[in-house]
Amino acid sequence: MKKFLVILMVVAMASVLFVGCTTPPTPEPEPEPTPTPTVKTDTPIITLINGAQFDVSSTATQRINDFNVVAVAPVGSVLKLYVNDVWVGTGSAGAGGVSAAITTTATIADGVKTIYVTAQASGLAVSEKSTIYTATLDTTAPKIASVVADSSANTITVTFDSAVVTTAAGATSARLLANYEIAGAAFTAGTITAVSSTVVLVTAPAPVVATGGTVFILGCANIADTLGNAMAAAFTEVYVGATTP
């Protein structure tokens, strides 16, 4: 029995020594990370924004709700168009480094917008932003802000929320009178003067105002703002106060 225990102890010690001497496997080397490019692509140059509608020297308000931009960048580079720092379109620089029109992929809301592009050539970092241009977009038709009549309805002042003109549909010799009506009948006499957003209608003779006052319905049509945003025909109630019978 003692002999058996001695043999068992020798085997156990040998096992421990064997395990302790075993060389651990060599780990597989990790792949080298791909270095991030540090050399930037040349900065692109915007040459056109919406062609004749809006060029690079314009800061006027525009009646548009999208952009298409042409830029010059290194041949083959990918260009990205940003409006108010939001990526809205992608293009590429072809022969001569000139891009086809980069068009926005969604309708752009009215308001003040900044526009620029970036470029990235293969193996290079993204460029700096191009020159940043600013445009104000306005595609909203004017609205009537207020209508006020004097006590006899001889003078009716209509105020819009922006400067207004008549549309082509209203451009007749009598357009100023024909574009307005009161109590369902077009003005047949009188004068009209447009001053910015205010239109003054003068009736002759004045419509009849009942004792206790009258509510007239003023209608207008063929009205647009100076950009050409046309409003739908509008009808507005006008209260004229009581007069002495």
Image: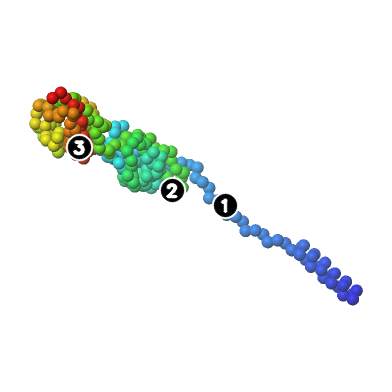
* Closer-to-camera residue (155/222): 155
Disc nearest the viewer among 1 and 3:
3
Number of other residues with Cα within 10 Å of mark 1, as a class: few under 14, some 14 to 19, many 20 or more: few
Which residue does the image show at 20% across and 38% down from the upper left? 234
Q: Amino acid at mark 3?
A: Phe
**In screen coordinates, is 54 left or right of 242?**
right
Q: Are marks 1 and 2 in contact (CB under 8 Å)?
A: no
User: What crowding class fits label 2: few (fewer than 14 Cα within 10 Å), some (14-19), or many (20 or more)?
Assistant: few
Question: Nearest the camera: 173 or 101?
Answer: 173
The circle on residue 235 is: 3
Q: Residue at x 15, y 29 (%)?
A: 210
Residue on which disc 2 sits: 122
| Residue 194 x, y percent position in the rendering | 18, 27
Query: Real-space Cα distance between discs 1 and 3?
Result: 73 Å
Q: Residue at x 27, y 39 (%)?
A: 139
Between 106 and 87, the one lying in front of the other is 106
**Picture coordinates of residue 41 (x, y %)?**
43, 42
In the rendered structure, the answer to whether residue 1 lies left or right of residue 194 reads right
Q: CA distance from mark 3 to mark 2?
A: 60 Å
| Quadrant of the image containing the C terminus | top left
Camera-side residue of 162 and 245: 245
Q: Quadrant of the N terminus?
A: bottom right
User: Which one is earlier in the sequence, the residue at label 1 or at label 2?
Assistant: 1
For the point 37% across and 40% down, the residue is 83
Q: Dot 2 lies on which element?
A: loop
The three-letter code of the residue at mark 1 reads Glu
Q: Mark 3–mark 2 contact, CB under 8 Å? A: no
Q: Which residue is mark 1?
A: 32
Q: CA distance from mark 1 to mark 2?
A: 20 Å
Q: Secondary structure at mark 1?
A: loop
Q: Position of residue 30 (x, y in %)?
A: 60, 55
